Image (spheres, rainbow, N blue to C red):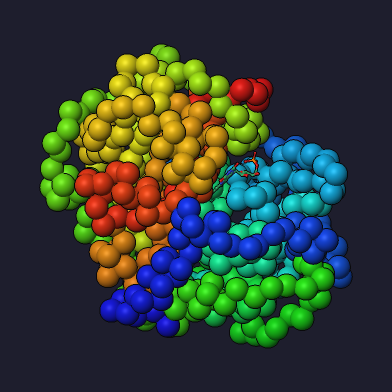
Amino acid sequence: MSNNSNTEAAWNYHEATKHSYISVRTNPHSLDFPNQPLPFKIYPALEPSRLPGEVRQTGVAALSAIASRVPAHANATPDLEAVAQLLYLSAGITRQRKYSGGEIYFRAAACTGALYEVELYLVSADLADLQAGVYHFAPAEFGLQRLRAGDYRHVLVEATGNEPAIAHAPLTIVCTCTYWRNAWKYQDRTYRHFGWDNGTLLANLLAVATARGLPAKVVCGFVDATVNRLLDVDSEREVAFSLVPIGYDSGLSAQTAPRAPADLSPLGFETVPLSRHEIDYPLMREMHAASALDSTEEVAAWRGHTPPGSTDTELTNSTPSTGPAIELRPLYDAEMPTDPIEQVILRRGSSRQFARTPISLPQLSTILDRATRGVPADFLSSSFDDSGRPQLNHLYLIVHAVDGLASGAYVFHRDRGVLECLKQGDFRKQAGYLGLEQQLPADAAVDIFFLADLPPILDHLGNRGYRAVQLEAGLLGGKLYLAAYAQRLGATGLTFYDDDVSRFFSPHAEGKSAIFLVAVGHSVKQRT
Ligand SMILES: Cc1cc2nc3c(=O)[nH]c(=O)nc-3n(C[C@H](O)[C@H](O)[C@H](O)COP(=O)(O)O)c2cc1C
């Protein structure tokens, strides 16, 4: 049960899962490869029906698709072909690579450790070529397994306290996260990864929805138990994390949404165990339980409370600029790469090595500008508009090699489109250290850190605000990836030494928490 005045659970979890120089040296964990979890959820008794492999290419430029969205009330309904494209480009298998221990099935969005703990489900009305039902997406077969027949959208309308985007959507995609699949490697820190890995997937999903002319929104407020029951997941192992209503039907509303078949009885479908045995990390389940919403009233009260300090104006007012400000100079329209979103998603793959060659200020400016034009989400202000663009995470940069920008540490002010210099210098060595002593952040052209002022976020959004802030970071990080690859640059998500990051950017970042990190630069190996 979430209680905004008691956010101890989020603080405990956050503190307990910080990485530090000492924590990584005192953690005896090693990877038990014979017990590695399966990369897919398998229902042996359910034959998947194949999704169409041939889909219409939208041709919409990735840099437009990530930066804009279809108006919330534009009537649009996806058909099966659109569903196939949305699923493929957010969670489909896009590459395979053999290694000594087996095969890695790389998916469309970046994911910590390539462990892919996010599963997708559909809750759908009758669509062209798809009967109303609740479905599980099976990426290995590129198919759908029907779990329930009939229109169950009303369950989601109730579970979200009549969230209008859900009430009007012909289709909602439900994202769940499976603890063990990621905790096998990352232990308790996996709950943070739920937000990151679900977020990168959502960056792709929202961009593709936009390219297809479909309104879409991220919904984090729902009665957890109801959604888990609808999917019949074992909530000790797998939990609903976010909902994405897709499309808009003006003829529908909370009142007119078809009544669900009343019966939400367990389905009892067998699933193949992920491993021979699983190790429990109770801290994550405690965090999840403490951030659960238990009733529609609680959901309605939770929604739409954008915390103070989450708009740039407020951030700027609370921390006035003192350092020199450098204006962003995004590429002119005529220079802007127009590579379509489909192509860019398939081209993306985390950089494994950066060349120490500079990117240009217009390239960096375009990445920052296009990736931060706002996220349609229920945890942000309901008066969301393009000028307000509320955002929970603040972007701090370590610049190593950007032509036209002195090397140093910067904070990004979205409202004014400027980078404020906090300190100048060559910080490659420090950046490598901050990114968990890896080479990638030391070699990148720029490291983009996400920091959040957790006290007001948790005060307003309770423990569930912790889910929201991680999810938003993953989503913005996913957009940074796409904005980089649209310009034929490389990028990779990275993990970090929490408190050292805050210290590095202080005094400006005093009191803020490190949430996420993406490095950008020229990959040594360019993906075509
Ligand atoms: C949130 C996040 C954190 C990551 N952290 C690291 C990291 O610390 N080191 C690293 O080499 N790769 C990291 N990666 C990259 C993943 O290993 C990569 O996404 C995964 O292997 C899938 O490959 P792909 O991105 O090329 O599709 C991270 C990715 C994400 C999304």
Left or right of residue 190, residue 98 in this image: right
Please report the residue visible at 41 percent of the width from the left and 14 percent of the height from the top: 334
Image quadrant containing the C terminus: top right
State which quadrant residue 33 falls in: bottom right
Residue 506 is left or right of residue 89, and the answer is left
Q: Is residue 493 left or right of residue 321?
A: right
Depth check: 412 or 150 in front? 412
Q: Is residue 356 above or below residue 436?
A: above
Single out the residue that lies furthest toward the top. 334
**Where is the N terminus found, in terms of image quarters?**
bottom left
Q: Where 69 falls versus 427 (above or below)?
A: below
Residue 424 x %, y %: 27, 28
Q: Residue at x 40, y 18 (%)?
A: 360
The one of 496 and 52 positioned closer to us in this rendering:
496
Residue at horizontal 13 percent and vertical 36 percent from the top: 322
**Along the horizontal axis of the image, is 311 left or right of 178?**
left
